[in-house]
Image (cartoon, rainbow, N blue to C red):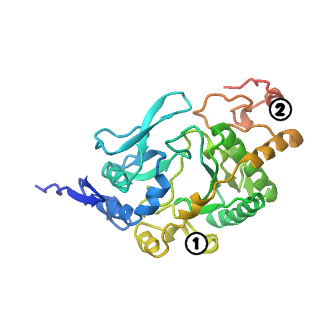
Amino acid sequence: MATKPAAIELQVGQRSVRISNPQRVYFPTRGETKLDLANYYLSVGDGIVRALRDRPCMLHRYPEGVGGEKIYQKRLPKGAPDWVQTVEVAFPSGRTADELRVTELASVIWAVQMSTVEFHPWHSRAADTEHPDELRIDLDPQPGTGLEEAKIVAEIVREVLAELGMIGFPKTSGSRGLHIYVRIEPDYGFREVRRAALAFAREVERRAPKLITTAWWKEERGTQIFLDYNQNARDRTIACGYSVRGFPWAPVSAPLTWEELPDVEMRDFTIATMPTRFAKLGDLHAAMDDAAFSIAPLLDWADRDERDRGLGDAPYPPNFPKQEGEPPRVQPSRMNKANWADAAATVDGVEPQQLD
């Protein structure tokens, strides 16, 4: 009978972290194991800790490897050592939970021991979870588009940010698209930050309306790049920089320079290639904390959109309670003419009738 592989101990700073089943294959394309995953995160330690530091973090766990069951873990898994820190957050439902709060690399490696592959942090920090300090611009390719189209949109995003005097930090999603992060002053709550993100997305959309869409409903998006403004709502998370993604070839969400963006391919960045890249370039997002920007100009844009263009709020994700001023949360194809009239009335705060 086969002997179960012995657990090993990894020394991470002053902590000793146990890794059980170290030879279990997590990524079948090249055969990388759980231990390979842990060693990857050790190799990019400064980068992954900076991306996660003090943020509530949801974990994507794969106990049998990425070909098996995926567990979305918001609450800290049981059995955590006493040195693993947490932070309490409130979800859109009003319920609360203690999520992982990374303060040191050992916490990341312990999460790997708990079968975590992906790290999805909030855009606020433990000191004040109600006030985000990160604006996230998510370029999501729709069917018929891909990374090449997302690169074109990223350059438009960069131009609009420059007009605002803001600096964006791009990275691959590790899947199909791109993310661009902007450090912001934590002066506003989730509702205002999402409103600012929507105003920004609408301005980018106006620059290339045939290529870019802010339409929430998939049936309206067409062959375009969707700017997902809702990634800035409460409890909406995306994989952070240096996070591995749960695909067989072990891709990584890789921080980039603007100069290299036109030539990158998603498969350039895996747990096999990123350690060498990180050793050479260091953390390309390290300068993000050097300056934080106000979203006040974007809120002015939101006021302008509503006043001059009749553009009010846009739909929230389905798990959110109905929001004040939100348009009907129902697919346009399922709305009759009376509902469309009601939808227009929501600009004035009138609640529309929704169809089942």
Distance in Å between CA atoms under marks 1 and 2? 43 Å
From this view, report whether residue 244 is shown above or below residue 99. Answer: below
Q: Are marks 1 and 2 in contact (CB under 8 Å)?
A: no
* Nearer to the camera, 354 or 161: 161
Q: Secondary structure at mark 1?
A: loop
**Mark 1 sits on what residue?**
264
Can I make out residue 177 in this image?
A: no
* Nearer to the camera, 265 or 43: 43
From this view, report whether residue 132 is shown above or below residue 51. Answer: above
First in residue order: circle 1 vs circle 2: 1
Residue 167 location (% of width, % of height): 67, 61
Disc 1 packing (10 Å; few <14; some 14–19; many ≥20) = some
Residue 311 location (% of width, % of height): 81, 40
Residue 6 location (% of width, % of height): 17, 57
Describe residue 170's horizontal placement relative to residue 283 as left or right.
right
Disc 2 packing (10 Å; few <14; some 14–19; many ≥20) = some
- Mark carried by residue 127: none
**Mark 2 sits on what residue?**
344
Residue in the image at 31% along x and 45% along y = 83
